[in-house]
Image (spheres, coloured by chain):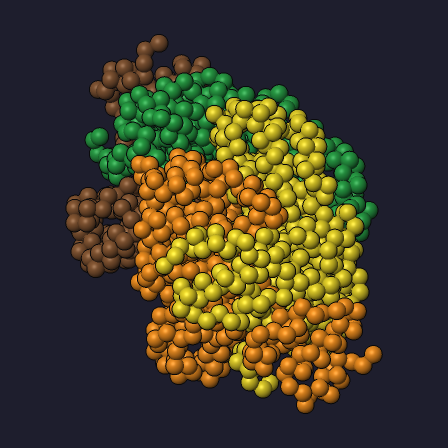
Chain colours: A orange, B yellow, C green, D brown
Amino acid sequence: MKSFNKQKLELAEQSPAELMQARRAHLEKLTKTSLRSISSPSFDISLASTKNCENLIGKTEIPLGFAGPLKVKGDFAKGDFYIPLSTTEGALVASVNRGCKAISKAGGIYVYIEKSGITRAPLFKTNNLRESRQFVTWINLHFKEIATQIENTDKYLKLLSIKPYLTGRNVYLNFTFNTADAMGMNMVTIACDRVIRDYIEKKTKVKCIALSGNLCIDKKPAWKNKIEGRGFSLQADLTIPKGVIKEVLKVDVSRIMDVYTRKVLVGSSLSGSIGFNAHHANIVAAIFLATGQDPAHIVEGSLGTTIMEAIGENLYVSVSIPALIVGTVGGGTQLETQKEALTILGVAGGGNPSGTHAKKLAEIIAAAVAAGEISLISALASSDLARAHKSLGRGEKI
Amino acid sequence: MKSFNKQKLELAEQSPAELMQARRAHLEKLTKTSLRSISSPSFDISLASTKNCENLIGKTEIPLGFAGPLKVKGDFAKGDFYIPLSTTEGALVASVNRGCKAISKAGGIYVYIEKSGITRAPLFKTNNLRESRQFVTWINLHFKEIATQIENTDKYLKLLSIKPYLTGRNVYLNFTFNTADAMGMNMVTIACDRVIRDYIEKKTKVKCIALSGNLCIDKKPAWKNKIEGRGFSLQADLTIPKGVIKEVLKVDVSRIMDVYTRKVLVGSSLSGSIGFNAHHANIVAAIFLATGQDPAHIVEGSLGTTIMEAIGENLYVSVSIPALIVGTVGGGTQLETQKEALTILGVAGGGNPSGTHAKKLAEIIAAAVAAGEISLISALASSDLARAHKSLGRGEKI
Amino acid sequence: MKSFNKQKLELAEQSPAELMQARRAHLEKLTKTSLRSISSPSFDISLASTKNCENLIGKTEIPLGFAGPLKVKGDFAKGDFYIPLSTTEGALVASVNRGCKAISKAGGIYVYIEKSGITRAPLFKTNNLRESRQFVTWINLHFKEIATQIENTDKYLKLLSIKPYLTGRNVYLNFTFNTADAMGMNMVTIACDRVIRDYIEKKTKVKCIALSGNLCIDKKPAWKNKIEGRGFSLQADLTIPKGVIKEVLKVDVSRIMDVYTRKVLVGSSLSGSIGFNAHHANIVAAIFLATGQDPAHIVEGSLGTTIMEAIGENLYVSVSIPALIVGTVGGGTQLETQKEALTILGVAGGGNPSGTHAKKLAEIIAAAVAAGEISLISALASSDLARAHKSLGRGEKI
Amino acid sequence: MKSFNKQKLELAEQSPAELMQARRAHLEKLTKTSLRSISSPSFDISLASTKNCENLIGKTEIPLGFAGPLKVKGDFAKGDFYIPLSTTEGALVASVNRGCKAISKAGGIYVYIEKSGITRAPLFKTNNLRESRQFVTWINLHFKEIATQIENTDKYLKLLSIKPYLTGRNVYLNFTFNTADAMGMNMVTIACDRVIRDYIEKKTKVKCIALSGNLCIDKKPAWKNKIEGRGFSLQADLTIPKGVIKEVLKVDVSRIMDVYTRKVLVGSSLSGSIGFNAHHANIVAAIFLATGQDPAHIVEGSLGTTIMEAIGENLYVSVSIPALIVGTVGGGTQLETQKEALTILGVAGGGNPSGTHAKKLAEIIAAAVAAGEISLISALASSDLARAHKSLGRGEKI
């Protein structure tokens, strides 16, 4: 059998689409399979094969549904939105849809971005603590120079702060950036690399050991991101009147509170969970897939808190999402189906330079997460979770 | 504007595909967009619209690449595998591919399933602790009866244990199941519901407040799942000889260890992370999407530990993944492109009744995660992370 | 200046008391201080200097007060108890006392030990995962032999289980023991050491790297102990009638719940706390010091959960303490003042061989912790925390 | 039996010492015990009974030993120190002493305070998120006024920052203070109470629900304090030459590293521990008891990180202690034996107004913690932990 590398060379003259087909054919032969459905993506193969996915052989298709309208009262997202949701879990779209209905009937949900900033924390090694301390002092004194150099690498990049964490010889510099409408991890990694090589290492003689020292902390579930935030940190709330609870959610506030307190607060605490919620991750995942976000960031998206309180017979609900990492340019957002999903929300491509599209998207996601929480907790309270899964997930009549 | 519900009624006579197109057209009108790319999925619309996604309007396409061959020495996965990876993050496939090469050149990776069992923890409310204690005693005494009833709901379902967690009036019964080749969350939720309504509540008069009390704990990042495991708990290891490190990874063991210890062990600990790894979530996410797993379970997939040790000039590597939640039947696995990806791995559909396909898939994922860890940490150690992202993620020549 | 070692030799013929005085005089000279108050302890100097504290120079005195009577309805502790509390924090004894009054007026508190077992987790290093797996299998197969050997080292020692945790080459064997009335850490460390040297290492050729591998996990705050328990895991509860809340606690149930939910549940969750309580550690600390427990185990004593619920206008309260590590023989319990404090509770020295004194002490502590929680949360709810601290902590008139 | 309250009234004319004896006699009668050893404390009974301990009946005695000399190279602690240690755990003083010897022979340990500030986080309730946001804005705008009012309550008090944490209607304002040589919890609670009642509530009409909302977070083990620090956050390090390792610690660097990595880093991570160390809590506890600190703060003192690295055949060691809560005035520090222990360290009473005594004490504790870590990990590495406990803890010959 000819080696694949050899094969690749021979294919060098071919178009990206031809290369993709050739790779696919090669894999079919190697694995004795027929891979028809994955072929013929509707995205730009040339772009995808260079920017999104090496060794491209085709595409995976995820069913796309929508929920809404969802009335959002944000700083950036104002009005009624239809939420694109990519999912394979029966009942999820229906559930979020019910939550949207409850929210909209209640007059909409207030939402805002408490803070924002994507982080990258390169790791430096000094000879000892005395040097670590001097190094930190030097960094603090030269923040302005570092910021200038970083901001020169990309016009959409703004350095907000550098927060040092140290233990002995290890110094982690947690850089926080504004990256406008881009999610920005690549942009900031490249910018950090440059300023470290060209400036910090040269001036201080302190060696950078790794561009990421896990203090960022990217794609791992960590208390630091819960407490300090990463990407967008959002807050949303509303009060659902008694009538809407009864009509839309088919339950009453006291049963909701009975479930909420024992499950979301007490149950999560006994599990050692960072997230205190019912299923933030489900809604975050479905919108992330629909709109081209990095699915590994669902991890950070799961860290949030849902608050429910009985106010008389009405239900007060808030969700806090400390680390929502999204963008509307770059990465998966440039793929055709994802771009269309962003269009549904009115946030495709870049907004104004301060990142209005990404912020609007973040606010909509927070609102949709609230919809998902309201619906699931109500469903548990009215005992119909298993029934819904049975009828929807397994395709039976409701 | 005609209400969507009204619209739906009129469409009731139409085929699932027609309904999907009508919904899409409706949404285009509502949002003044053109949604061409999302239309015309290759999956079975009738199936997807009833089992995977309500309000279906089309599909999201994710670029699909592959890495490998990856030599795996598991109990279930034996031989060379090509790993399907759905991703939009440039450099990821290339990185995993390099890791596969290092592993295969080193003679392959040993992997096994330490334990398995999916969980569901319904929440009960008693009047006081004395009753909670009696209730727990009753449950322990009637395990056999409960198991029989549960196993009658589904021939692939086996109840392994019921572990009670209580605090005052709140009793969480953590049911653990073997669900063969199915991921099984729906199956076990339905089974729990039935045995609770028909047997436990009737006999004990203790009320189930919610079918899930967050002690499971599903789709939230929690220490309980790290410590006790959920779904499949896997271990994998190998030793990479000095020569392979140099040739494939372009670095040496001492630099890898310098990065590894300070980043993965110390850095994670300072962040309050549950996961002690470089980027398990990336590889888990890419295979989950390719093979139709639930993307919200990437959260649990991020909890793992990577161990690296210098053994002379060779590198010892192990990965532990405590909570990998996968299946090869049901949910997203029945979609066409996902089924093809499973076919590449030889695990499409059900294996034998004990769940050999799901176990094989789990072992392959653990091996691929190791490949991803080896490659990324080596890249950081050889300082080329930013360069790789720049060239691949932004589409420039390497 | 003569070296202290030299000095020690010359003093070798002296009595323990003379040695203590000589050391103290030596230290006074070295540090140019006068150390009169620390001299002349009432405990047995010979015993203390060999079993509790090397380089003995005297004693520290902590003020000892008491709270109560506290009506306890436990399996081991039944009746009214007066709780000895050693503390230097003004207002603590008064606060616990008020809680005792509320509990006793409410008819007492139900308490029981959910499970018990002290742990030690020696750490082994194998050559690879295959060996780790074999080693674990061997351990499981030879549990009985290991138990026999361990139980031969001490008649009060019973091995309950060995639970392996592994990651790659590292195998942590979590031994759990019943140690009767002794706290038992020393006893189990010695027993582990012996069985490892004499049996496990010899038979398996697997090397024990450290007698404790931090999986125990002793004197560090860890989710494992919260979730799985260590030492005694206790549960306690009661319902306080509206009248008692008003009369003793000077507040009403709705204000208590307002504070409780937002502080103990939500506030703790946002802080990344393992303990979900108001101040378990305060009460645990005061009783630990009074009764000769190891003060570093206050760490584990802080991990508990307090639950409060409004039941109409009455208040339901429970406390769960997952890891209370106490004994009534050995260590500090043999010191005179500590023994007297144990006498107050009727638990000095060993009870029957199954450890009834330690269990009774544990139940009393859980009840006292509940008293502390009830009082502090009520005080916060009635806004008088600062006032109490001001008047008591600073010595003013109430 | 006459009620104790009645009894108290009759005793009202008596001196504090007489009252103490009467209470003790009363308790002896009630519990049918003889409490001779706890009587006759050497501390000022009048002071202790009003400021430290209500219902005073006597004292608990803890054996006091010392370790040292320990060479410290801090910003505040410079020179050789003898460390007072109150403990009942045989082997602890001997172990710390060996660590001191290793450090001093290595030329001493560098230590500094990275940051400091005690916190109190009162909890406010608004009507909704919009109000929470406005409230936070108002607080930020009026920081100066709040600081002025707070600083007027106590000349040693300085408000450093107010950091808001919010979720929905709950707003936690985390006040951080400099309290000079006082530990300061009471001082800051009183100051917060006053500024809230007299200013914040009046101006904003937002109600303070509790003076502490568990975001502080006091006496509970929490990631927030690990990550952001509380009280004093310290760093210390040194390199121990090969010769000292061999001579004093009886082991070599490679065996130390084998234990350290697998136990302190990997073992802690698998346990879900916040502390990554061997036994910080032991040393913190012993010095806290000796010097009159609040023993419930041992919880925060257990959160630290120990780093060990082989540098050739030498051993690099650092300890990071994020939340050491100590003072040299107020609370237990004014008791006679505690004051003498502070005198041994040259830090009794207040230093200059910026808190030099408390800072010096904090630095010494960090150095002593390092001594304890070095000794215990070396002991484990040289396999003599069990032997040491056996001979010392049980009083046998070494």
Q: Position of residue A28 (x, y in %)?
A: 75, 72
Image position of D264 (left or right of A104):
right
Image quadrant where one finds the N terminus of chain B: bottom left
Q: Residue at x 48, y 51 (%)?
A: B9
Q: Which is more toward the observer, D145 or B218?
A: B218
Q: Nearer the viewer, residue D79 or B45?
A: B45
Q: Nearer the viewer, residue B86 or B378?
A: B86
Q: Residue at 42% x, 29% y: name it.
A: C317
- The spot of residue D383 in percent (x, y) is 68, 50
Q: Residue A91 versus residue A167: which sits nearer the camera?
A: A91
Q: Identify which residue is drawn at 22% across, 30% down.
A: C398
Q: Residue at x 62, y 70 (%)?
A: A59
In the drawing, does residue C174 fall left or right of residue C103? Answer: right
- Determine the image quadrant of residue A158: bottom left
Name the outermost residue toward the top: D1
Q: Is residue C354 above or below residue C1?
A: above
Q: How many marks?
A: 0
Percent position of residue B237, x then y = 72, 61
* On-image quarter of the C terminus of chain B: bottom right
| Relative side of D250 to A283, left or right | right
Q: Can I make out residue A310 in this image?
A: yes
